[in-house]
Amino acid sequence: MKVAGLGFRREATLASLRDALIAAGDHHDITAVATVDDKAGETAIEVLARELNVPVKAVTPDRLAGVATLTQSAVVKARYGTGSVAEASALVAAGHNARLIVTRAVSRDGKATAAIAEGEGE
């Protein structure tokens, strides 16, 4: 299972999410997009998932907490207990033996991040 994890500000647009995913590069053949559950219902991520023809996987904050990530944001660490929502949500949603294949990439407007993980599914 190949999952694109997305972290984003509430004001991020569909263009922000697309740009972050493009910046991540290796987004072909993803089987899902994932983000923290309180943002999983945002219109931009739902539209992106429909465009990619994949489901949105909502990850609860307690599952993000403690996930080791390669990149670190002090703000994200304080709020979610992990260094990157994009990386942590991709790892959690990718399932057993997940590994990052693309670390956090940032959209040009700075409002969204994307990371790609591959694993054995949940």
Image: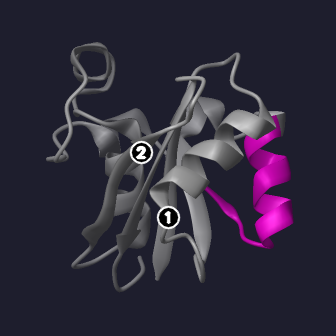
Tell me, yes or no, if residue 58 can be seen here.
no
Side of 57 relative to 7 (left or right): right
Q: Residue at x 61, y 68 (%)?
A: 32
Name the residue tied to disc 1. 25
Q: Secondary structure at mark 2?
A: strand
Tell me where residue 63 sits by quadrant.
Answer: top left
Please report contact status of discs 2 and 1: CB closer than 8 Å, yes or no.
yes
Relative height, residue 62 to residue 47 (above, below)? above
Q: Nearer the viewer, residue 3 or 104?
A: 104
Tell me where residue 82 sits by quadrant.
Answer: top left
The span picked out in magenta is: 44-57
Relative height, residue 13 to residue 103 (above, below)? above
Q: Nearer the viewer, residue 59 or 87?
A: 87
Q: Identity of the amino acid at label 2?
A: Ala
Is the magenta region chiefly helix, strand or loop?
helix
Q: Secondary structure at mark 1?
A: loop
Tell me, yes or no, if residue 84 can be seen here.
yes
Name the residue tied to disc 2. 105
Question: Label 1 crowding class (10 Å Cα cut-off): few <14, some 14-19, many 20+?
Answer: some
**In magenta stretch: residue 48:** yes
Q: Identity of the amino acid at label 1?
A: Gly
Q: Residue at x 51, y 61 (%)?
A: 4
Q: Residue at x 36, y 68 (%)?
A: 117
Q: How is the image coloured?
A: one colour
Side of 31 relative to 105 (left or right): right
The location of residue 49, given as percent across then percent down, is: 76, 59
